[in-house]
Structure formats: structure tokens, C-alpha cells
Amino acid sequence: MEVPKLMSAEVHDESYAGVTYHVEGQLVPVLHIELSSMPVFFEHHILLWKDPVVGIETKPLKGAFKRALAGMPIFMTRTNGIGRIAFSRDGAGQVFAKHMKAGESLDVREHQFLAATDNLEYTYNRVQGVSNILFGSSGLFIDTFTCQQQDGILWLHGYGNVFELTLKPGEQIDIEGGGWIYKDSTVRMDTIRQSLKTGILAAQGQIFWNRFTGPGRIGIQSMYVHMPTNK
């Protein structure tokens, strides 16, 4: 299996799917988007600045109530108009884009999403098996973004440095529960329990990993964070 590769930290004048964007900043990076006819949607609290001509409207979500109970955002916001807009998350790390073609789908760990072109379909799923072990009774939500027809862009934030690994069919990697960012829908994720029977840590009893099985890509962050959840 290959070693995960470090992703680029800065992007200038990148154009894809009818959108031009820039990622700048070494510590707390900023995503700048030049809007044309394609709107983008985003979490409302990560907006940094915008041109006055760019309007903001709500993009309601289905099942908002159960997400609110788990501390997740109950609505998304969407741009309306042509101009410039910028986003930043209040955490040191990297902002990066995933260019998506028709038929591609990415599963994203909660609190890693930044923005996306409005042509991507957005759904989410609560993973109780993993959440009961690692995240408390409120559950772990995984956001899924699917590109159905025309090309689209998904922008994500990773804490620390971001690495990508492409698993071949049957290849596996164990990652700490807060260390992964995204995976292709073709990558299977399981929770692995490891008993600590000997040594100085034996009193702790057990540790847990997320095991990922290929084929497909997976994103890893070096400064993994476990977000607080309701119990």
C-alpha cells in the first residue's frame, strides 16, 4: 500500500465546473470564490466576506429537527447573484477542493464541509455503530455529496495537514476515529475494537479504530478533532 500523500495548501486561479476559486493562507486558510451563473451553498457560520451585490438565501434541509438535537446545523445558506465571496473555518488547517464528475459520490465526516456548487446533491446519514463507541449517544453524522449530471466542486476543511490515500481493491488502513475527513462511497468503513491486555496501558481496557477497505480514496487530517456531541 502506498503512503498517504500531502495535498497542496494553496491554489490560485483554479477554474472548474464554471467556477474560479483561490485558496490562500498558511495557518487559517481562506477560500475565495468568483461566482458566475452557478450558486454555491455553505454552512452559514463560515462566511468571511462578500461583495454587496451577492445575496444570501436559505437552503432548507430535510430532517432538520434530528440534526438540531445532535448539534448539527439545521439549515444551509446559498448564494444568489454574481460576484465574489470568501469562507474560512475558525481552525488551523487546510482548505481544499474535490472536483467531481457525474456519478461520483463522496462521504464526508461531520464538521468538515465548507462549501459546494449548488448542482451537487446533499444527503446525510447517522452512523450509530461508530457513534456509540466513539462519539456518544447523539451519533456521528456523515454527509454525502453526489454529482449526478454536470461537473461540480466540493470544498472541505481539514485540521492540521491533509493527506490523501488511494486504496486498491481489498487494501485496508486503520485510522483514529477523528483522523479521517472524506472517503469515496466505494470505500467501506468498519469499527475495530482492540483489547489492551499487557503493558502499562492495560488498565485502559481497549481502543477503537475506523478500518477502511478499498477501492477508493480517503482523506486524512494530521490534527484530528473530536467535536462535542450531545448525550
Image (spheres, rainbow, N blue to C red):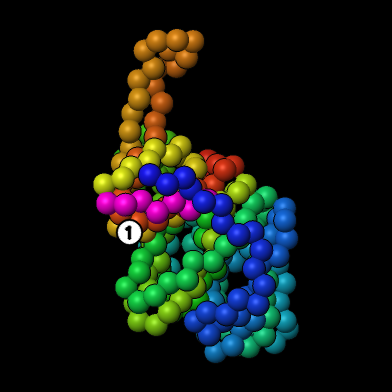
Viewer can see residue 128: no
Q: Residue furthest left?
A: 170
Examine the rendered structure and indicate whether residue 172 appears above or below residue 219: above
Residue 22, can we see it?
yes
User: Does 95 sit left or right of 48 as displayed?
Assistant: left
At x 39%, y 38%, the residue is 174
Q: Position of residue 119 (x, y in %)?
A: 43, 79
- Residue at image position (43%, 79%) is 151
Quarter occupied by the N terminus: top left
Res 173 quadrant in image: top left
- Judging by the rendered image, the residue that carries numbered circle 1 is 185
Q: Residue placed at 70% from the left, 65% from the top?
A: 24
Q: Quadrant of residue 204?
A: top left
Where disc 1 sits, the SS reads loop
- Residue numbers of the magenta segment: 163-169
Type of residue at label 1?
Ser
Q: Is residue 133 left or right of residue 35?
A: left
Check the image and report above or below for 19 versus 195.
below
Question: In the rendering, at what x and y percent does residue 164 appear?
Answer: 48, 53
Q: Nearer the viewer, residue 52 or 155?
A: 155
Magenta span: helix, strand or loop, mainly?
A: strand
Q: Residue at x 45, y 10 (%)?
A: 199
